[in-house]
Image: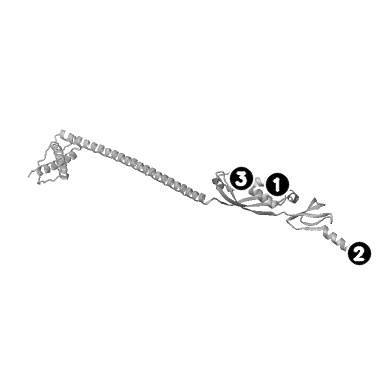
Amino acid sequence: MELVFGFLVFVLVLIFLGVKTVPQGEEYTVERFGKYTKTLRPGLNLIVPVFDRIGSKMNMQEQVLDIPSQEIITKDNAMVRVDGVVFFQVLDAAKASYEVRQLEHATLNLVMTNIRTVMGSMDLDELLSQRDKINASLLTVVDDATTPWGVKVTRIEIKDMEPPADLVDAMARQMKAEREKRANILDAEGFRQAEILKAEGEKQAVILDAEGRREAAYRDAEAREREAEAEAKATALVSEAIAAGNQNAINYFVAQEYIKTMKEFAISPNQKLVFMPLEASSVIGSIGGIGELFKDLKDDGGPGGNGSGRAGHVPQVQRD
């Protein structure tokens, strides 16, 4: 009875040793007499008790490692302190277990050395302005290096870059100078544009003024031409009347010039003293002659008409 009980216990122990449960997100390697034989996937798995054993338990999820801060020397001999993070995932549990020892430590050191290599080949300005380029270069190099380990590096991110304090101050002064330079350029451009617009406005004003003066001169010339035509016509009419022997036409011309002269004399800016009447009887007689002239022209049907008018009749004007 004891033998049977012992056998049952032995069988139960063998079953317990031969049945392995692998949790989700992990894989186990199996070794037989110290040599890798297979990989156990998540779920219920069976191995040969006593002969087989679990070699390594690998986490197949994406993992993250903090890259400690380190100082690097850039291409232009600037000292910069940087740190970052690396994300990786084990794709082959067997390679990750047997191709490299201390996978996380090896990956961390590989990333740190490549950070010094990549960033040390760049100037400080490139280092500060091209972080995406640095991340892409590091990812390419490290991923290629970890492929034989059965590891896929998914991302490498540089978190902080800290230049020395004196460089930070110099950069701040440079940035301030650049901004002042841009501000001065913008001010100069604005002043230049304003001067151009002002000159264009003045030019347009001069053009419009010249066009206005040209139009005014044209209209003045037209008015003078019409006035001359009217004067010529009036002169022709009076000349015909004089030729017909009408004395009133002569009186009309005399009165017209007399009144014009008196008008110019009155509006002149010099001081003057005029005693009236000034040959007023002559003016009145001339005005009477003008009336008779128009009456004669009306009766004759024109200056040279042959009607029954009184051409040649000179009315008598009483003078005072």
Depicted 40 relative to depicted 289: above or below: below
- Furthest-left residue in this view: 320
**Residue under circle 1?**
147
The 10 Å Cα crowd at callout 3, few under 14, some 14 to 19, many 20 or more, is: some
Residue closest to the eye, 149 or 80: 80
Estimate the x, y position of residue 25 in percent, counting from the top left: 73, 56
- Mark 2–mark 3 Cα distance, whole angstroms, equals 70 Å
**3D distance between C-alphas at marks 2 and 1:** 53 Å
> Which of the marked residues, 2 or 1, is nearer the chain's N terminus?
2
Residue 11 as seen in the image, left or right of residue 189: right
Q: Quadrant of residue 284?
A: top left
For the residue pair 20 and 200, the one nearer the viewer reads as: 20
Would residue 262 appear left or right of 144 to someone viewing this image?
A: left
User: Which amino acid does the dot numbered 3 rest on?
Assistant: Val
Residue that numbered label 3 is attached to: 118
Q: What residue type is labelled 1?
A: Thr
- Outermost residue to the right: 1
Q: Quadrant of the C terminus?
A: top left
Q: Mark 1, mark 3: which one is toward the viewer?
A: 3
| Residue on which disc 2 sits | 4
**Mark positioned earlier in the residue sequence (1 or 3):** 3
SS label for mark 1: helix
Of helix, strand and loop, which one carries label 3?
helix
- Determine whether the residue tagged by mark 2 lies in a helix, strand or loop: helix
Camera-side residue: 153 or 312? 153
